[in-house]
Image: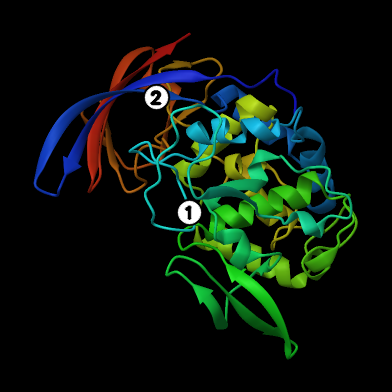
């Protein structure tokens, strides 16, 4: 992936957080929001233009491959930033256990290990062991129960801790072992697996992988896996947790998971639009550009009232006037500073933007 169009920006936002559903506390958050800037997102979306199916998948394969991999003993150092709860504890998606990171930077926490979502036994030659997008921290029991199973919707349960499960499914009356991802993370797992199917599409699959993937550049997902992953991708949209993880891993591997930044592209590769060329100006699901501090009236056509840190149910006003649409043209607002206010059921606040020539 070319790094020349990746940039970072900072946005200072005043938030008022609704606490315990009783009263508001005004808090100032200075949030460093790492994301593709408006110009970068627009450039990327137009690089996708006219592509679909195999052509789009191969383009993503070329542009989003890692430039480097992390060393094995550095994985937990990355997890301190990419897989961490708000209280500083380890984000273990497979359990509700509270686990602290050790005092040194590189050791794994007690009773914790890592798990490869696309299992290493699925590879004929597992050369991509430490692609961080495929690795999640978990408690030490997970590999014992998850083993080399495919993901799926468990029908007959073998193991469950109330968060995730393993068991049997039946395809054409043939029983197969599967695991069901942790509740609320089905979409995360789907986008990880679709990333792996895109970046390593030339792999020769082995073990249980032959029941889930097809050899060759396209479509890589078979009928079962395509239906399952598309369903999970739609039911569990991209979250702030995934966006943060994408940003952190980018600074280690210098690549991103495109299905986190551009989730609508999934449909143009494996979904109903897989034979329809993608054109962002005609796609209502095209990625919105997160709010930032400064816009140019000459290069930025519109301002999307969107931030991954603000709920989608928020209502907006600009300079005291209610806004019903999800975006507004920069020329409509005009040059100078403008105050944006938002309010949802759980959070409210304000921020200022500036439009320059």
- Height in image: 339 above or below 152? above
Mark 2 highlights which residue?
Answer: 332
- SS for dot 2: helix
Which residue is more in the foreground, 221 or 253?
253
| Residue 331 location, quadrant | top left
Residue 165 percent location from the top left of the image: 53, 71
Q: Residue furthest left?
A: 22
Residue 17: x and y, percent? 21, 37
Q: In this view of the protein, can residue 43 be seen by the observer?
A: no
Q: How far apart in space, not on screen, are marks 1 and 2 (Cα)?
A: 45 Å
Q: Quadrant of residue 230?
A: bottom right
Image height of 85 relative to 338, above or below:
below
What residue is pinned by disc 1? 93
Q: Report the number of numbered marks.
A: 2
Q: Say which quarter of the image contains residue 219.
A: bottom right
Q: Is residue 109 left or right of residue 173?
A: left
Which residue is outermost to the bottom?
173
- Please report the residue visible at 76 percent of the width from the left and 27 percent of the height from the top: 67
Quarter that holds the N terminus? top right
Q: Residue at x 16, y 29 (%)?
A: 26
In-front residue for pair 98/351: 98
Note whether 39 is above or below 347 in the view shown: above
Near-viewer residue (15 or 123): 123
- N-terminal label among 1 and 2: 1
* Left or right for 172, reference 103: right
In the image: residue 255, left or right of residue 308 = right
Q: Residue at x 53, y 51 (%)?
A: 138
User: Is any atom of residue 311 visible in this view?
Assistant: yes
Query: Does 68 appear above or below 148?
Result: above
Of helix, strand and loop, which one carries label 1? Answer: loop
- Residue found farthest to the front: 110
Numbered tag placed on residue 156 in the rendering: none
């Amino acid at each position: 992936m070319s790094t020349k169009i990746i940039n970072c920006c900072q946005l200072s936002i005043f938030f008022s957080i609704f606490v315990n559903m009783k009263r508001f506390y005004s808090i100032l958050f200075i949030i460093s929001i790492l994301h593709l800037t408006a110009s970068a997102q627009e450039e990327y979306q137009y690089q996708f233009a006219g592509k679909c199916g195999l052509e789009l998948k191969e383009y993503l394969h070329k542009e989003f491959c890692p430039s480097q991999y992390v060393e094995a003993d550095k994985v937990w150092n990355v997890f301190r930033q990419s897989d961490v709860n708000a209280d500083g504890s380890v984000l273990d998606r497979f359990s509700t256990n509270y686990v602290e990171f050790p005092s040194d930077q590189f050791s794994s926490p007690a009773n914790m290990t890592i798990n490869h979502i696309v299992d290493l036994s699925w590879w004929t030659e597992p050369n991509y062991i430490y692609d961080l997008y495929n690795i999640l921290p978990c408690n030490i029991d997970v590999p014992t129960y998850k083993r080399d199973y495919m993901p799926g919707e468990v029908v007959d349960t073998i193991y469950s801790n109330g968060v995730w499960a393993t068991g049997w499914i039946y395809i054409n009356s043939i029983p197969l072992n599967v695991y069901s991802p942790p509740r609320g993370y089905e979409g995360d797992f789907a986008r990880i697996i679709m990333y792996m199917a895109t970046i390593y599409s030339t792999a020769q699959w082995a073990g249980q992988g032959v029941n889930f993937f097809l050899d060759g550049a396209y479509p890589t997902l078979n009928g079962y896996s395509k239906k399952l992953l598309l369903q999970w991708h739609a039911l569990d949209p991209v979250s702030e947790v995934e966006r943060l993880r994408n940003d952190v891993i980018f600074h280690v591997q210098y690549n991103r998971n495109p299905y986190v930044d551009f989730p609508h592209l999934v449909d143009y590769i494996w979904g109903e639009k897989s034979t329809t060329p993608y054109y962002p100006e005609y796609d209502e699901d095209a990625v919105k550009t997160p709010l930032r501090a400064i816009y140019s009236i000459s290069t930025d056509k519109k301002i999307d009232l969107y931030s991954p840190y603000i709920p989608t149910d928020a209502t907006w006003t600009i300079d005291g006037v209610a806004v019903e649409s999800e975006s507004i043209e920069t020329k409509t607002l005009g040059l100078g500073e403008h105050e944006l206010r938002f309010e949802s059921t759980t959070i409210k606040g304000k921020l200022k933007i500036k439009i320059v020539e």
